[in-house]
Amino acid sequence: KPREIILQINRTKHVITASPDASLLMVLRNDLSLNGPKYGCGLGQCGACTVLVDGVAARSCVIPVGEVGLRAITTLEGLANAKTLHPVQAAFVQEQAAQCGYCLNGMIMTVAALLERVPDPTEQQIVDALSGNICRCGTHIEIMAAARQAAR
Ligand code: FES
């Protein structure tokens, strides 16, 4: 049943009332109006809901909010500072790497996490990092170009 839960999201503490079994994705979207993370499959299989948990890309649709604790959650909204785009966001804009755009949250968060770990990734490392992120429009060529540009 619902209880008070404290979360650290985008460098800010939030106190919410939610069932600990609710997914982090639903809490982010419905309780905190953070709509960067998207609901795609709800099964951890498409990547649309990706957020960073302590800097590591994770699928928020399969994380029960009651298990998050005080780990640092970063959503698309918190990736950049308020004034400028994050370099990965800027690269995706420059390469026009969106068609419908639904997958882009997951693509951007996944590339940002990769570059945090591996600042100068190989083509294969980018492919491997994005292999679990599904784009139904098929803009993979532009997405790869944006990822390569962000790594420069
Ligand atoms: Fe979470 Fe698809 S909505 S992986």
Image (cartoon, rainbow, N blue to C red):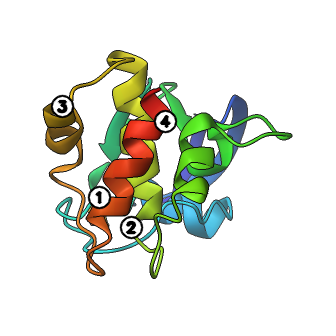
* Position in image of residue 143 (x %, y %): 37, 57
Q: Amino acid at mark 3?
A: Gln
- Looking at the rendered image, the disc whose residue lies closer to the viewer, 1 or 3, is 3
Q: Earlier in the sequence, mark 1 or mark 3?
A: 1
Relative vertical location of residue 58 with respect to residue 104 in this rendering, above or below = above
- Residue pictured at 19% horizontal, 66% vertical: 43
Cα gap from disc 2 to disc 1, whole angstroms:
7 Å
Q: Amino acid at mark 4?
A: Ala
Q: Amino acid at mark 1?
A: Gly
Q: Amino acid at mark 2?
A: Cys
Relative vertical location of residue 49 with respect to residue 20 in this rendering, above or below = below
Residue corresponding to mark 4: 150
* Near-viewer residue (84 or 140): 140
Cα gap from disc 3 to disc 2, whole angstroms:
19 Å
Quick check: is the Cβ at mark 1 less than 8 Å away from ligand 1?
yes
Cα gap from disc 4 to disc 3, whole angstroms:
14 Å
- Looking at the rendered image, the disc whose residue lies closer to the viewer, 3 or 2, is 3
- Residue pictured at 21% horizontal, 59% vertical: 44
Determine the quadrant in which ligand 1 lies.
bottom left
Relative vertical location of residue 64 with respect to residue 128 in this rendering, above or below = below
Residue corresponding to mark 3: 125
Q: Residues within 10 Å of mark 3 (few under 14, many from 20)?
A: few
Cα gap from disc 1 to disc 3, whole angstroms:
17 Å
Task: Find the residue positioned furthest to the right.
Answer: 83
- Residue pictured at 68% horizontal, 65% vertical: 33
- Looking at the rendered image, the disc whose residue lies closer to the viewer, 2 or 1, is 2
Please report contact status of discs 2 and 1: CB closer than 8 Å, yes or no. Answer: yes
Residue corresponding to mark 2: 103
Residue corresponding to mark 1: 47
Quarter of the picture containing the N terminus is bottom left
